[in-house]
Amino acid sequence: QVRLVESGGGLVQAGGSLRLSCAASGTIFSIYAMGWYRQAPGKQRELVATITVGGWTNYAESVKGRFTISRDNAKSTVYLQMNSLKPEDTAVYYCNTDSRGLVWGKGTLVTVSS
C-alpha cells in the first residue's frame, strides 16, 4: 500500500524558514517525478514545486527564489526548504507525484504570522 507522510510544518513568523519532508513507502519512489502542493483555506490545491527523477526542478512564480525542492531517492523522501516565508504561504502542504497519481497523505500545516 502506497503511503505518503508529510512532516515539518509549524508556526513561523514572516521572514522565517521551515523545511518540510515527505516520506514515501510502498512504491518505487525513484521512478516518479515528485511535487509539493499546498491548499490554503477556501482555495484549491495548487502545485508549488516539482522535481524530476534526474533532479530538474520547477517552481510556481509565487515561491520562485524562496523555496527549494530536493529529493533523496535512497530514503524515498522529498524535501521542501522554505525561506523568506510570507503570510500568504500559510496552507496545508502535501506531496505527490507531478501528476497527482498517488493517494494523498494528510499533509502538514504551515502557518506564517505577520
Image (spheres, rainbow, N blue to C red):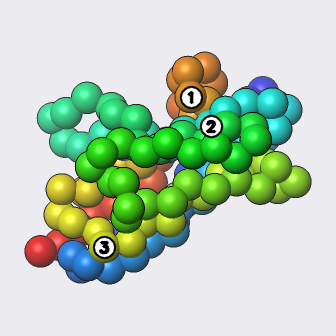
Question: Looking at the image, which residue is at 77% across and 56% down?
Answer: 72
Q: Which residue is mark 3?
A: 84
Q: Quadrant of the C terminus?
A: bottom left
Q: Which mark is residue 40?
A: none
Q: Can residue 43 be seen by looking at this rendering?
A: yes
Question: Looking at the image, which residue is at 87% across and 54% down?
Answer: 74
Q: Which residue is mark 1?
A: 98
- 33 vs 62, left or right, is right
Q: Secondary structure at mark 3?
A: loop
- 25 vs 99, left or right, is right
Q: Secondary structure at mark 2?
A: strand
Mark 3 crowdedness (10 Å alpha carbons): few <14, some 14-19, many ≥20: some
Task: Work out whether 26 lies above or below 78.
Answer: above
Task: Work out whether 17 lies above or below 95.
Answer: below
Q: Which residue is mark 2?
A: 34
Q: CA distance from mark 3 to mark 2?
A: 23 Å
Amino acid type, residue under disc 2 in the picture = Met
Q: Position of residue 12 (x, y in %)?
A: 30, 76
Q: Can residue 12 be seen by looking at this rendering?
A: no
